[in-house]
Image (cartoon, rainbow, N blue to C red):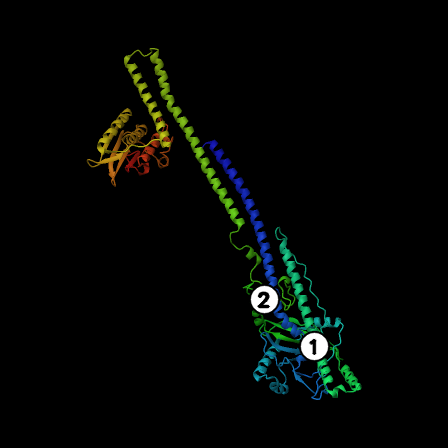
């Protein structure tokens, strides 16, 4: 490769490298921006679905938990005495003379509430659903509860006693009690003079937890990530406030409904029954005074979920509240219920299966720091969506940006290949032109020098001998023929390259055609002091369809090539062999020269291409003979090939084979 050619390829490679480097940078920037945008979009959609899922879960629990939070304290006794009861004559019955079953006693099995319980100040654990034996016999017929139901509830209560220890809940109970003590109690009219503790009154103000400072990785294109997290935290606080307000509203309604109903019924009764309508005002005042003496103030905390460690070591979920009657002792009672966490978990996950099919609920226990963006407000648990935002954002698929980048890379590669091929063709053409000019100049120099020298000598009469003059004239004739052959080769090559030459096919006898071709070939061999041996192996009468003149020129060029490069061999024979191969005529030209190496054989038919080494030394030519022979062969629909030296016989040099396929 010439130095100038190397510079051209180096400049081309540098340009391609610069373009590729710029495209790599642009691709990286575009991919980062696309990933950031995709992550922001996925983050927004993810948090939106997450907020919807959390609302569903909290809404699923809100109603039942609010009802449990508003449940009067005396429902946790199997039997309780109503505050106001009237006989058939509408006279008020003294409190404590009538008892009615607790709604919890006749409660049908809930889907996920296993059993209600109450823990007394001395640590005794009881349940209104598991009354004492003497009460059980009475209530069994009254509310229709079977012994099997009592046995099942009792078994659950015994299981609860194994892990529901006051000592394990001490920190939570103390926290609830301290909050109640800091809040001023409110009076509430008691309906049960025989109860150990007072009526529910929720006096604890709802404290909305503020989100802890969160660290969000700040990266270009991810500003919306922090926005979505803040929205989720704010949404969590709204759900906390909503649940608390809902529980408080249920409490207030529970406190107001029963007195209003009783007062309304009593007013109607007094207006319709003369004995009551005519009762002296003094008796009414006595009743109101007795009722006032029966009042007990009660404070109660919110219903709070707690995680305990079950007997088997797994998490158990209980909901508890602290109740403090403002009596002489003022001791704290714990009321609540035990939840079936596996069942509740399955029910809640079904609510969000359409949003997060592989989601899970994970308990948050003790000092575990919960992620408020995924936390439930009704229970201390977080929703694990089961799939990460990064996995969703990095999901495969062709996007318009990626298609555009692939197109840009494809265009760059295609353009580089096209430019490289074009540059290679231009360089090859330039080298061919240089080789052609160099070869033609070299070939023209010798005959022109001979013409000039011999013509001057003959013109000046310097050659006096007739014999010498005839020799000079023959030399001038040979050089003119050589020059004419050179020019003819160039013209023929030009016509073949422009496809301006068309063969004229004829059907000729092989033997007659061979004798015509061999005559001119012998003259060329004789001029090189070599001999031509013709070997016709075709059957008598064999014919071939070809262009005789083009075929003769091909054979002549092959013989001329042998005369140039094999004239220094000890065996100066050139073989012209004709045979049949698979019904086709094969013509071979074989010499005994140095042969053609495999390296030269690959490019031996290129225009202006000559061999290397001792094969070329001192030989005239411009490298068009074999190129013309191959192009003529193609025009005749024939195949011209060379057998490399490694595949030739030991005594043979170059071997060319022409296979005639006909028109």
Please rate how many residues cluster around mark 1, counting C-alpha atoms within 10 Å: few if below 14, some from 14 to 19, many from 20: few
In front here: 87 or 165? 87
Residue 168 seen anywhere in this rendered image of the structure:
no
Q: In which quarter of the image is the C terminus?
A: top left
Residue 339 seen anywhere in this rendered image of the structure:
yes
Q: Give the alpha-carbon distance from disc 2 to disc 1, as whole Å.
A: 37 Å
Q: Which of marks 2 and 1 is in front?
A: 1
Q: In which quarter of the image is the N terminus?
A: top left
Left of 566 or right of it: where is 512? left
- The numbered mark at residue 619 is none
- The numbered mark at residue 361 is 2
Q: Mark 1 points at which residue?
A: 257
Residue 484 x, y percent position in the rendering? 33, 23
Residue 157 x, y percent position in the rendering? 61, 79
| Disc 1, SS | helix
Could you tell which of marks 2 and 1 lies nearer the N-terminus?
1
Please rate how many residues cluster around mark 2, counting C-alpha atoms within 10 Å: few if below 14, some from 14 to 19, many from 20: some
Left of 48 or right of it: where is 620? left
Left of 173 or right of it: where is 493? left
In front here: 58 or 489? 58
Name the image quarter holding residue 201.
bottom right
Residue 181 x, y percent position in the rendering? 74, 72
| Disc 2, SS | strand
Name the image quarter holding residue 605.
top left
Query: Vertically, is 34 above or below 67?
Result: above
Query: Vertically, is 600 above or below 122?
Result: above
């Amino acid at each position: 490769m010439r130095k100038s050619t190397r510079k051209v390829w180096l400049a081309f490679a540098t340009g391609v490298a610069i373009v590729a480097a710029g495209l790599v940078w642009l691709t990286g920037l575009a991919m980062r921006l696309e990933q950031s945008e995709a992550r922001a979009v996925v983050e927004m959609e993810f948090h939106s679905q997450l907020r919807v899922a959390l609302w569903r879960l909290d809404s699923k629990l809100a109603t039942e938990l609010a009802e449990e939070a508003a449940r009067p304290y005396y429902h946790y006794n199997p039997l309780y005495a109503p505050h106001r009861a009237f006989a058939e004559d509408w006279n008020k019955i003294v409190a404590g003379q009538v008892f009615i079953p607790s709604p919890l006693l006749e409660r049908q099995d809930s889907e996920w509430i296993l059993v209600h319980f109450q823990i007394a100040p001395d640590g005794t654990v009881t349940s209104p659903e598991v009354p004492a034996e003497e009460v059980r016999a009475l209530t069994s017929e009254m509310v229709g509860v079977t012994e099997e139901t009592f046995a099942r509830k009792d078994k659950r209560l015994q299981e609860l006693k194994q892990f529901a220890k006051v000592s394990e809940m001490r920190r939570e109970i103390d926290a609830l009690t301290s909050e109640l003590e800091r809040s001023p109690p409110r009076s509430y009219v008691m309906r049960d003079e025989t109860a150990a503790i007072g009526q529910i009154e929720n006096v604890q103000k709802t404290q909305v937890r503020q989100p802890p400072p969160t660290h969000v990785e700040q990266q270009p294109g991810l500003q919306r990530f922090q926005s979505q997290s803040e929205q989720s935290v704010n949404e969590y606080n709204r759900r906390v406030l909503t649940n608390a307000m809902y529980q408080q509203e249920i409490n207030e309604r529970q406190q107001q409904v029963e007195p209003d109903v009783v007062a309304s019924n009593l007013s109607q009764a007094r207006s319709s029954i003369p004995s009551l309508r005519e009762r002296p005002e003094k008796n009414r005042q006595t009743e109101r005074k007795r009722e006032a003496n029966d009042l007990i103030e009660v404070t109660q905390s919110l219903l709070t979920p707690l995680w305990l460690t079950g007997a088997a070591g797994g998490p158990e979920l209980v909901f508890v509240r602290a109740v403090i009657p403002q009596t002489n002792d003022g001791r704290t009672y714990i009321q609540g219920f035990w939840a079936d966490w596996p069942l509740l978990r399955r029910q809640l996950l079904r609510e969000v299966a359409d949003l997060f099919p592989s989601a899970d609920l994970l308990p948050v226990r003790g000092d575990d720091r919960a992620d408020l963006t995924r936390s439930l407000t009704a229970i201390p648990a977080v929703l694990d969506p089961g799939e990460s935002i990064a996995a969703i954002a990095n999901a495969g698929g062709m996007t318009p940006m990626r298609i555009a980048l692939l197109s840009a890379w494809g265009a760059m590669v295609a353009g580089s290949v096209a430019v490289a091929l074009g540059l290679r063709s231009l360089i090859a053409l330039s080298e061919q032109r240089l080789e052609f000019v160099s070869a033609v100049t070299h070939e023209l120099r010798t005959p022109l020098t001979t013409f000039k020298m011999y013509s001057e000598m003959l013109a000046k009469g310097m050659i006096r001998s007739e014999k010498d003059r005839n020799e000079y004239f023959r030399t001038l004739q040979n050089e003119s023929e050589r020059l004419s052959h050179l020019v003819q080769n160039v013209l023929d090559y030009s016509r073949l390259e422009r496809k301006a030459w068309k063969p004229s096919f004829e059907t000729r006898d092989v033997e007659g055609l061979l004798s015509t071709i061999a005559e001119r070939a012998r003259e060329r061999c004789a001029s090189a002091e070599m001999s031509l041996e013709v070997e016709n192996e075709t059957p008598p009468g064999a014919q071939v369809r070809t262009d005789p003149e083009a075929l003769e020129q091909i054979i002549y060029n092959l013989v001329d090539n042998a005369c140039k490069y094999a004239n220094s061999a000890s065996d100066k024979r050139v073989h012209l062999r004709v045979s049949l191969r698979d019904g086709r005529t094969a013509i071979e030209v074989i010499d005994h020269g140095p042969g053609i190496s495999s390296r030269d054989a690959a490019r031996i038919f290129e225009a202006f291409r000559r061999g290397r080494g001792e094969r070329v030394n001192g030989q005239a030519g411009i490298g068009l003979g074999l190129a013309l022979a191959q192009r003529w062969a193609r025009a005749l629909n024939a195949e011209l090939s060379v057998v490399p030296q490694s595949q030739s016989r030991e005594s043979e040099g170059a071997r060319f084979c022409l296979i005639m396929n006909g028109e």
